Image: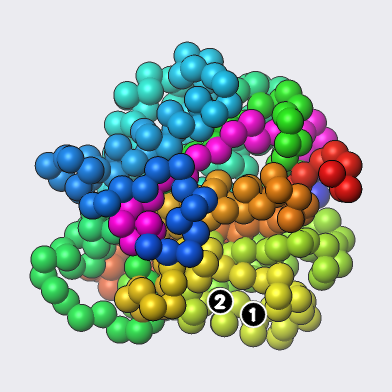
Amino acid sequence: MIQGRTWVFENRPYIAASSAVGGPFEANGPLAEDFDFLHGDLWLGQDSFEKAEKMLLEQACKKAVDKAGMKADDIQFFLSGDLMNQVITSSFAARTLAVPYLGLFGACSTSMESLALGALIVGSGFGDKVLVGTASHNAAVEKQFRYPTEYGGQKPQTAQWTVTGAGAAVLTSKKTKDEIYVAAATVGRVVDMGISDPFNMGAAMAPAAVDTIESHFRDLGLSEDEYDLILTGDLGKIGHRIAGDLLVKHGLKLPEEKFGDCGLMIYDEQQPVQAGGSGCACSACVTYGHVLNRMKNGELRKVLIVATGALLSPISYQQKETIPCIAHAVAIEKGGDPKK
């Protein structure tokens, strides 16, 4: 069923299993215990950072499939995207997995874009075992979008630290033990407020997040305290503050204790990450690790993840284009007896 820009899944797409993989910075962060694997260096034994990123995604996908009690041959569709040119991380990982593949690009919103589309496939009956995922790598992204790490360029405090990691989940139509399912998904619009600074992504993406959150609540007629937790993807300190101010200005005051940001959760305040975390793996790792673990434990029952993405490229930046942004929201709920 569709309500405005929001898909409401009457046939529940259940999250059979998920996995999160991280690198050295993530290993030193506050959510380290929620990762399935943590690596001590950025290379992962490879001769390029791009190959290391591919390994992260392959590892997360294989672990999620294994935790779901399935084999790669059981997967009917694999939906994934990343930040590398022509989404090579996802395409090359799909080559290894050897499963039917749909490549996506939503920048850092890809985690929820893939989850929303995977849920649509399962909920509509066109698939029963769908794998979704995404990945990012700090050094690979820095080299492509900014300056290679070896350059040693100084960054302003508005800049964010790209997460080295990957997250994946398996969706199925069959009810699972934990009964965690995708309830709804709101598709974002492209919003461009004229910001062109690639070192201030949070400010650029905040209006898109607000637009999608407003639409989600309006489409479904929800009250402000509907969710136990609402997380934006990777707005960081600057963008999250802007998003909160804009929501109040637009008449939607979310409870402060329930409104957070994945980019502010994945790292400790003592880590040198400027305004916080970012990258495709930011919301993917927090959601498929920390958030789902809390849902399994019964701490959370209704969660809204609003993954944000800056749709720029090295070429658009060099041609002095502004940064178009988008945000996709996915509502995840836990069924069963609330007392259990």
* In the image: residue 37, left or right of residue 231: left
- Label 1 – label 2 distance at C-alpha: 6 Å
- Which residue is the site of mark 2? 240
Specify whether residue 304 is in view: yes
**Residue located 56% across and 76% down the image:** 240
Is 5 contained in the magenta span? yes
What secondary structure is found at the residue carrying circle 1? helix
- Which residue is the site of mark 1? 244
Q: Position of residue 169 (x, y in %)?
A: 55, 37
Q: Does 69 sit above or below residue 165?
A: above
* Quadrant location of the C terminus in the rendered image: top right
* Residue 212 in which image quadrant: bottom right
Q: Position of residue 3 (x, y in %)?
A: 80, 49
Say which amino acid is labelled 1: Gly
Q: Does 148 sit above or below residue 110?
A: below
Q: Are marks 1 and 2 in contact (CB under 8 Å)?
A: yes
Magenta region: 4-27
* Residue 120 in which image quadrant: top right
Q: Position of residue 263 (x, y in %)?
A: 48, 67
**Residue located 73% across and 23% down the image:** 174
What secondary structure is found at the residue carrying circle 2? helix
Say which amino acid is labelled 2: His
Is 105 contained in the magenta span? no
Q: Residues within 10 Å of mark 2 (few under 14, many from 20)?
A: many
Specify whether residue 109 is in view: no
